[in-house]
Image (cartoon, rainbow, N blue to C red):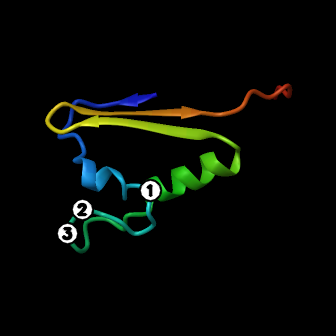
Amino acid sequence: MVKDTGHGIETQILEKIFDPYFTTKKIGEGSGMGLAMVHGIVKNHNGLIIVDSTPGLGSVFQIFLPASGHFL
């Protein structure tokens, strides 16, 4: 789980945050690939990401991955 107390994410933006190249930053300040890459990695491992965000209060990202019987 990753939690912050930042600005939070508005509902209409929350629907797009995992889209490749989506960003709310100005040109030259970010590519919009970070969350799309995380989503792809988690999905490729049969996992799930749950996001809860409230504008003005922050966001919580929970990542769930299936258990494995293999140990390093």
Q: CB of mark 3 within 8 Å of CB of mark 2? A: no
The amino acid type found where label 2 is placed reads Thr
Q: CB of mark 1 within 8 Å of CB of mark 3? A: no
Position of the C terminus by quadrant: top right
Which residue has dot 2 on it?
24
Q: CA distance from mark 3 to mark 2?
A: 7 Å
Which label lies toward us, 3 or 2?
A: 2
Percent coordinates x, y for residue 31 in the rendering: 36, 68
Which residue has dot 1 on it?
18
Q: Which of the two discs, 2 and 1, labels the residue nearer the N terminus?
A: 1
Percent coordinates x, y for residue 45 in the rendering: 70, 45
Secondary element at tag 1 = loop
Question: Residue farthest to the right?
Answer: 70
Give the class, few, some or many, for how many residues have Cα within 10 Å of label 2's Cα (few <14, many ≥20).
Answer: few
Which residue has dot 3 on it?
26
Q: CA distance from mark 1 to mark 3?
A: 18 Å
Left or right: where 57 falls relative to 51:
left
Secondary element at tag 3 = loop
Q: From what the image shows, is residue 58 above or below residue 36?
A: above
Q: Quadrant of residue 4?
A: top left
Query: What residue is shown at x 37% (from left), y 64% (from top)?
Result: 32
The amino acid type found where label 1 is placed reads Phe
Q: CA distance from mark 2 to mark 1?
A: 12 Å
Left or right: where 23 falls relative to 69:
left
Give the class, few, some or many, for how many residues have Cα within 10 Å of label 1's Cα (few <14, many ≥20).
Answer: some
Left or right: where 54 falls relative to 30:
left
Q: Quadrant of residue 65?
A: top right
Q: Which of the two discs, 1 and 3, labels the residue nearer the N terminus?
A: 1
Secondary element at tag 2 = loop
Percent coordinates x, y for residue 42 in the rendering: 61, 45
